[in-house]
Image (cartoon, rainbow, N blue to C red):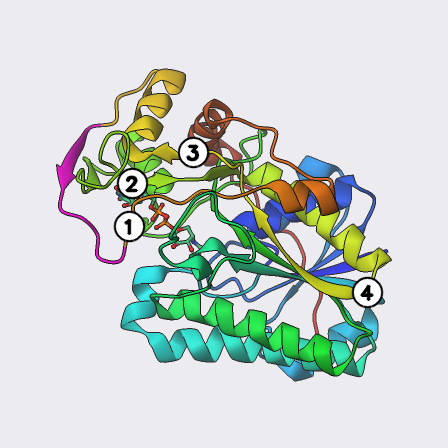
């Protein structure tokens, strides 16, 4: 069974491609490489010892998408492709609305043309805004505070309207909490260009002496130690959640939304201290003012994913810290060519 993975050379996409191949699916990756590297394709092949088809293609390009659907017998889609930096979305809202919405609408239109009506969509816990109580359940009020989060919420609405117009669709919306960690091989992981927006990639760059010091954004939140609390989930657990979701959309029709988190929150200082302990390395940091828009605490109710998808996270915060650093330490040694890609 052939699955199309948009954004499949990205952080979560590449880990999901590995789990799909390990589960016996065939995988076709579509990625424009705007925020990832072609060499990831080869690393997926090395990790899984299986072949994967790769097309360098922008998901907004319906002409190319049609050629791919015409050539490949796509049974279902996992849609990761999209811009995802909160801060950048505030500065460039039109770029985010254009890219994230147009790519999704183009994809859904081509899927419909080819009678492919099974999709797993990569959403985010950011659609919950600042939750009034915890843990966060899927039926909680939704509220976004930045254009990136708004694109996710709008796409969730598009998918719900699409299903209401045609009950032949089968749709799973996955709301990720805070993905960190990397494949144990050290071959793939989170590798943002430039200054990272997110906490773990920043910690890793400070540990690796690529950056001098970590700024801890605020220590006056209503949390155990005053620093922000988040539900960090290992990216391999997250990828395995996608396997359960794609199996569900292949088997059933309908539309549903699932939190993918661990159900447990850790503070910034707790994550730093765990990282230092596990990797036996220093991470200099200093407390600075809050980052605008940040919330105090966020962690998932995991009941629904457990009950309906029969999925729960297995890896712990120590695994996440160990694997995050292992990727950086090893990634320099494992640079490979990206291998061939299909021409259209
Ligand atoms: C985590 C904690 C910061 C950086 C965002 C998006 C979300 C998802 C994950 C895409 C907070 C603190 C951070 C730093 C710090 N992305 N921090 N110093 O903001 O919870 O979620 O990324 O889907 O949609 O909203 O993640 O890693 O940026 O921050 O102190 O240099 O670390 O204040 O408490 P966040 P984050």
The answer to whether residue 96 is above or below residue 298 is: below
Residue 253: numbered disc:
4
Disc 1 on helix, strand or loop? loop
Q: Earlier in the sequence, mark 2 or mark 4?
A: 2
For the residues labelled 1 and 2, the Cα–Cα distance comes to 20 Å
Residue 159, above or below 41? below
Foreground pick, 309 / 113: 309
Location of mark 2 (residue): 228
The residue where tag 1 is placed is 195
Task: Tell me the chief SS of the magenta region.
Answer: loop
Q: Is residue 30 above or below residue 201?
A: below
Q: CA distance from mark 1 to mark 3?
A: 15 Å
The residue depicted at 46 percent of the width and 71 percent of the height is: 151
Separation (CA) of disc 4 from disc 3: 41 Å
Ligand 1 is within 8 Å of the C-beta of the residue at disc 1: no
Q: Is residue 245 left or right of residue 184?
A: right
Magenta part of the protein: which range?
A: 284-293
Give the mark nearest the N terminus, 1 or 4.
Answer: 1
């Amino acid at each position: 069974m052939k699955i199309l993975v948009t954004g499949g050379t990205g952080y979560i996409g590449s880990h999901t491609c590995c789990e799909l191949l390990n589960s016996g699916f065939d995988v076709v990756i579509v990625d424009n490489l705007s925020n990832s590297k072609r060499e990831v394709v080869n690393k997926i092949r090395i990790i899984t010892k299986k072949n994967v088809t790769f097309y360098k293609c922008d998901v907004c390009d319906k002409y190319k998408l049609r050629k791919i659907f015409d050539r490949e017998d796509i049974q279902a889609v996992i849609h990761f492709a999209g811009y995802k930096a909160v801060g950048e979305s505030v500065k460039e809202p039109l770029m985010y609305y254009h890219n994230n919405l147009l790519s999704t609408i183009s994809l859904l239109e081509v899927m419909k043309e080819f009678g492919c009506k099974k999709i797993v969509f990569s959403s985010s816990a950011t659609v919950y805004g600042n939750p009034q109580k915890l843990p966060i359940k899927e039926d909680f009020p939704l509220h976004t505070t930045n254009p990136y989060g708004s694109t996710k919420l709008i796409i969730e609405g598009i998918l719900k309207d699409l299903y209401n117009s045609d009950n032949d669709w089968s749709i799973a919306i996955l709301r990720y909490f805070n993905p960190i960690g990397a494949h144990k091989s050290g071959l793939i992981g989170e590798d943002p260009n430039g200054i990272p927006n997110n906490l773990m990639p920043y910690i890793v760059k400070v540990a690796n002496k690529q950056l001098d010091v970590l700024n801890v954004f605020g220590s006056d939140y209503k949390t155990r130690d005053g620093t922000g609390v988040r539900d960090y989930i290992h990216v391999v657990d997250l990828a395995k959640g996608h396997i359960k979701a794609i199996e569900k959309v292949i088997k059933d029709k309908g539309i549903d939304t699932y939190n993918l988190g661990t159900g447990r929150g850790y503070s910034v200082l707790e994550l730093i201290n765990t990282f230092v302990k596990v990797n036996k390395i220093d991470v200099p940091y200093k407390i600075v003012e809050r980052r605008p828009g940040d919330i105090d605490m966020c962690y998932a109710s995991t009941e629904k994913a457990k009950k309906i998808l029969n999925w729960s996270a297995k890896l712990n915060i120590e695994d996440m810290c160990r694997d995050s650093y292992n990727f950086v330490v090893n990634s320099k040694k494992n640079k490979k060519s990206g291998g061939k890609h299909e021409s259209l």
